[in-house]
Image: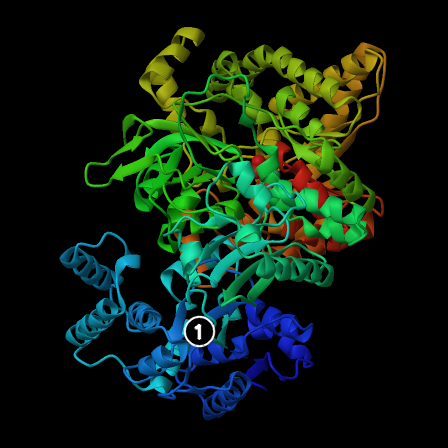
Amino acid sequence: MQTVYTFGGNAPHEDERQKDKTVTGGKGANLAEMASIGLPVPPGFTITTEESVRYLNEGEDFSDTLRSDVAEALTHVEQTVGKRFGDAGDPLLVSVRSGARVSMPGMMDTVLNLGLNDETVQGLAATSGDKRFAWDSYRRFIQMYSDVVLGLDHGLFEEALEIAKEDRGYFSDTELEADDWEGLVTEFKDIVERELGKPFPQDVNEQLWGAIAAVFDSWDSDRAKVYRRLNSIPAEWGTAVNVQAMVFGNMGDSSATGVAFTRDPSTGERAYYGEWLVNAQGEDVVAGIRTPQYLTKAARENAGAEKPSMEEAMPDAFGELARVFDLLESHYKDMQDIEFTVQQGKLWMLQTRSGKRTAKAALKMAVDMVGEGLIDEETAILRVDPMALDQLLHPTLDPDARRDVLTRGLPASPGAASGKIVLDADTAEEWAKREEAVVLVRVETSPEDIHGMHAAKGILTARGGMTSHAAVVARGMGRPCVSGASGVSINLAERTLRIGDRELTEGDVITLDGASGEVMAGEVPTIEPELAGDFGVLMEWADKHRRMNVRTNAETPADCRTARGFGAEGIGLCRTEHMFFDAGRISAVRAMILADDEAGRRAALERLLPEQRGDFAEIFRTMAGLPCTIRLLDPPLHEFMPTRDEEFEALSDDLGVGVDHLKRRASELHEFNPMLGHRGCRLGITFPEIYEMQARAIFEAACEVTGEGGEPVVPEVMIPLVATKRELAILRALVDRVAEEVFAEKGTTLDYLVGTMIELPRAALMAGEIAEEARFFSFGTNDLTQTALGVSRDDASRFLGEYVDKGIYSRDPFVSLDVDGVGQLVELAVERGLSTRGDIKLGICGEHGGDPESIGFCEEVGLDYVSASPYRVPIARLAAAQAAL
Ligand code: PEP
Ligand code: MG
């Protein structure tokens, strides 16, 4: 298998493997593709992802094949550029960068200016005619290489640089002259030798292989692992390495570097969008060290900025860039995210990839591109990540609310977030674990902050532009973010900060508006999102293409209304026990549980009946004839048990029974393993009066609402935690009997279904038999996962993270269905259920019903519907359409 692919110059780009991201990574594949359509790409080569996997698995050694293939590829680069690597007179310099299959912004390592040493720096000075540039490049290289490859703390070099500036009375780096940089190079080399006990490598080949190894190793760095876990990226993918001839954006005022998007990644508007810096090198833009300038005149004017846009300052290079933008969009048929460099007036493309975007932008671009004839409806549906819709479905700031604006930064990622200020990522994670809403406030973020960004509701940075690390990562995560808010200054030692002219302390509450860039004091009220426009259009397309229905898990009329607004086509799971916790009811529930006998239970149930009937009636009204699956009582009774003395006392007063007696009763009911104990249909078998009351409430409510006119109600009564046919037969007979009683009393009748959840492995295995008693199956994949894996759903979080890190499960099986294992049980139950009842209705109501990947599986096995929590309904609609395409 070919280990290395060359690109640029006269390299062949025909090999399919070279354009396959799984082989050459996203960056490598796109560099080859750009070169093949004639765009100006500096020549280079890509080492395949397969080689990095081999290297990491086989004891971190390079194969002889790889060594000779790299040498040959390097010759291609040398010949194309007309310079030699390590040539003291006119050296070729290269960049070495990682490039995984999917982009992992800032997660992995890059080394620039590689190939400089004490001799070649002289050659670079001579050929560029710019001594300062040469020595500045050399010191940058030592700094970067020492950090990335040699593992030295970059602070050591920063410190030396600061001292050098102080000694000379300089304020900024730009004041340093060639001799100053040369002096610093000596100091930097001394630092390396002092720290490592050996000199900085002068052999350019040693430099190259060191950098390649570092990129390979970076795949397994802690921050890459965290990123992979958060984004469900498998460990076995590995990363490619791209070695490419350097072009320089820091060769004076006719040189520049920038990043750009072919459309606005925040709003989706069709406008070139980006940032650039004159006389700067690659990472300067994204690192947020200098605040970049606008790309277009319009954007600059809009922002009221002074410094000229690229369109104004370098009209020729900008014109060329605009031509490239259009070529790339029509070639890739998608919005592109681009890195470029202008070296002495000539434009070079360093990267293109399909750009990350906010959900709003994704929707707009998908809908617009269909209008432009660039893509079709199906492609548009597939373009939008269902999970990204989450960003749009959540509330934004109420425009009428009072805003105590402290300062304003860049609107880097939309949405509103309020929370307590935290000043570092670990604190963010810690406080979030205590269920506190936090806003992470940093000078700028780096990949080390990723866990804190994830834990936070929003992110605020003092520095950095729209493409800074904070902005890119926040948009990807759907966290609101305001970046580059220069009115923020942080005192980490004192844990205080100043925002605008206000002094604040860690823990004070602020609100961010990621759409306007405003930072406000305190918590600002929010409003529900508007779901018309592009969202409505895409959803309409999705509905046209999906086969499965989408229902919701809801138990309050308010949730039902939200879900219907989001397009739910029925209720897939109404957990009746949630209605038992209301203040007025819990004491009747407790009285029922702790009663000594059936008579005592019935007395308590009498009190609950009108309440439940009222709930169901309201839900039926809200759902207006759509199917409603109501599940009878499921959880272990201990969940309702009083625990505090005051609770026992209140209950004692209510029932006229002594506290001691109640406590004794409570301890009699204690279970060691309640999730596998007296719960689900086992309650209905042993205390039939509970299910009788619930069935009565359902049918009375259904008759009442049907009697009001409207669409007739067809209740679907669902029995939980069934393991055997006989359990279901007994409870179905009970429900049928109560239905007959109610119909006789009301002098009317209506259709209804009795069915069961499939949430125990035995039920899945015996589904053929169970289907004889069930009109429908609803897969309760929460319990099915718990019981099939033998992993407690309530305690799993303590170890599951590590399981996912170690690749034991590729994703949390409670979030995304374990298709290989639990999936088999579902598949088997579907098959067996259908074999005895050909028209059995099949759905899923575990959390997986709102997870796009699991929804894909549901489509494959032929379920009729998925049921998701209200805010997940649009996600499920889109995912169901994608699954059907
Ligand atoms: C399930 O087990 O998947 C289910 C939907 O029921 P619950 O989560 O209420 O146990
Ligand atoms: Mg369950």
Q: Position of residue 675 (x, y in %)?
A: 49, 40
Q: Position of residue 766 (x, y in %)?
A: 69, 51
Q: Nearer the viewer, residue 111 or 124?
A: 124
Q: Amino acid at mark 1?
A: Ser
The answer to whether residue 722 of the structure is visible from this angle is: no
* Crowding near the residue tagged with mark 1, few <14, some 14–19, many ≥20 C-alpha atoms within 10 Å: many
Q: Position of residue 415 (x, y in %)?
A: 53, 34
Tell me if residue 122 comes above or below residue 700 in the rendering: below
Question: In the figure, is residue 773 to the left or right of 10?
Answer: right
The answer to whether residue 628 of the structure is visible from this angle is: yes
Q: Is mark 1 within 8 Å of ligand 1?
A: no
Disc 1 designates what residue? Answer: 95
Question: In the figure, is residue 355 to the left or right of 710?
Answer: left
Tell me if residue 187 comes above or below residue 377 in the rendering: below
Q: Nearer the viewer, residue 147 or 484?
A: 484
Where in the image, quadrant-wise, is ligand 1 located? top right
Q: Nearer the viewer, residue 663 or 872?
A: 872
Name the colour scheme: rainbow
Residue 754 falls in image quadrant: top right
Residue at 53% x, 75% y is: 49
Question: In the figure, is residue 448 to the left or right of 378?
Answer: left
Residue at 60% x, 23% y is: 690
Per the image, label 1 sits on a secondary structure element best described as: strand
Question: In the figure, is residue 665 to the left or right of 782?
Answer: left
Q: Position of residue 520 (x, y in %)?
A: 41, 26
Q: Nearer the viewer, residue 551 or 446?
A: 446
